[in-house]
Image: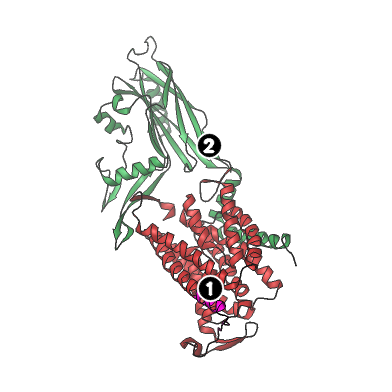
Chain colours: A green, B red
Amino acid sequence: MRRLALILLILAAGVPPAVAERLVVSLSNHRVQITSNFTGEDLVLFGTIEPDKGKTTRPAGYDLVVTVTGPRQTLRTRRKERVLGIWVNTASRDFVNVPTYLAVLSNRPVTEIADAETRRRLQIGLDSFLLPQRIGPDVADTVLTDPFRTAFVRLEQDRSVYRESPTAVTFLTPAVFRAAIPLPADAPTGTYEIDVKLFADGAMIERTASALEVIKAGFEQYVAEAAANHGFLYGLATTLMALLTGWLASVVFRRD
Amino acid sequence: MQIYLPIADIPVNIFLVLGMGLAVGFLSGMFGIGGGFLLTPLLIFVGISPAVVVASVSPQIAASLFTGFLTYWRRRAIDFALAAMLLSGGIIGTVTGVWLFTMLRSVDQLDLLIGLAYVILLGTVGVLMISESARAIMRAHHGLRADMRRPGSHVWFHHLPLKLRFKRSRIYVSVIPVWAIGAIIGFIGAVLGVGGGFMLVPMLIYLLRVPTATVIGTSMVLTLVTMIAATILHATANHLVDAVLALILMIGGVVGAQFGARAGQKIRGERLRMLLGLLVLLVGIRFAIDLVVTPDDLYSIRHVRDL
């Protein structure tokens, strides 16, 4: 079995790739640490487009779309309605396993980079990204105009965890680019996947992936782990802290 | 200066939270209450998830109450026998409350229930306190003595069995209403993230006729222990107690409480009750407005962790 895999690997390496370009990317920081002074961080993705030997870069130029997706979770979007004069959440939809962070970064608007069909197939842009909802027994993405989908994307954009930025990718030379990935202060912890797609003449010609990790570090990590794993002792310690603070205050301010 | 809260998962301005603690602590010292009913909505307004707020406010209230408790204890203004009876009911109420809170987190209507509960509780308590203190002020104005022990003011629960004599408070009542009051306060405290002092004090005065001398100190024992129990239970069951948030709040709270207590001693009892009644009513009205006025956004997102 292992030998077979090895043969396949050699074969794969030996076969010349069908694409004419190679995409090489590097991230400024693969591990974002949340410490007590964390207020968000801007990461930078650098990359080069290497044309195949003997060929030059395409005169028409390249387009680049970087899609960053954070850890996935099921999120519930609720809608309020007035019931007996009071605003109550009456309807809700669960968005199943959707990214808690989603950034679509490109060098120009995605609608100019590729046609609707390509965007849909490759999930390019917030409008084309699959956001499956649980509707009755089914789990499926809805039409773009679905009020819940619109509201969900709008709310996540307001929180800066979803974004579509047609200026975040800049070409330093025709073949060297940088992309700014902004992580907000309440960026969820976990693994983030970075999907880099290279376009020329409206078609994807190369694709590469990278990843980063957002973790709590130091004191933040210690407290979060204690709260999650040793709830009772954590509660006891918090109580003792409260009593100590209260006692100290009564000693410091004692007048009688 | 921003500080990242490890459980709430957002950064907050440390001075803003400290200031809130100070302000609420001042009022809590002035009125002899925990102040949770003010602090909880303030923190939700800052953007911290309601579930984390309710769990993290408990240790802060415990700290404020413990300071007050020590002061009243030194003055021997605590009826420990009555406190013990209230407590035995209170613990049952707290356990039920944390259980219900855990259940409700899986239902979408937790916000609505908390909102409605605030409106009803604060509205009722506020109106009752204002009208009572208004009558007391009128009486004082006309030179009449306040007479708490009017003949015929005994109601049905004063005739219940299991009567006990509480020496320090000089009352002789059945333990059944005492247990019931304890359980109600413990329950409400755990579900709403409030100590319940603003309800317990009037209940003890009007229902059990506990004298003013021992009522605040005694009520502090119950609210203190229920808040300690709520902290430990919330930490064990929901893992949502943010110790960093609690610490910032309690530092502000205990300092504010000292100045509040001094300010409170300069104001006459019925005036103080009138002020507290107005404050309680205002917060209740604020919640009512939130429920009735069309929200800016009809849609909202809940993360599964908060459910």
Single out the residue that lies furthest toward the front.
Answer: B142
Q: Amino acid at mark 1?
A: Leu
Q: Residue at x 70, y 60 (%)?
A: A248
Return the residue nearer the eye: A255 or B167. A255
Vertical comparison of A137 with A70: above or below: below
The magenta span reads: B132-152
Label 1 sits on a secondary structure element that is helix
**Residue A157 visible here:** yes
Residue on which disc 1 sits: B200
Does the magenta segment cover residue B88?
no
Q: Foreground mark, 1 or 2?
A: 1
Label 1: few (<14), some (14–19) or many (≥20) C-alpha neighbours in 10 Å: many
**Residue B106 visible here:** no
Return the residue nearer the eye: B11 or B208. B208
Label 2 sits on a secondary structure element that is strand
Q: Are marks 1 and 2 on the same chain?
A: no
Residue on which disc 2 sits: A32
Q: Which mark is residue A119?
A: none
Q: Position of residue A79 (x, y in %)?
A: 31, 52
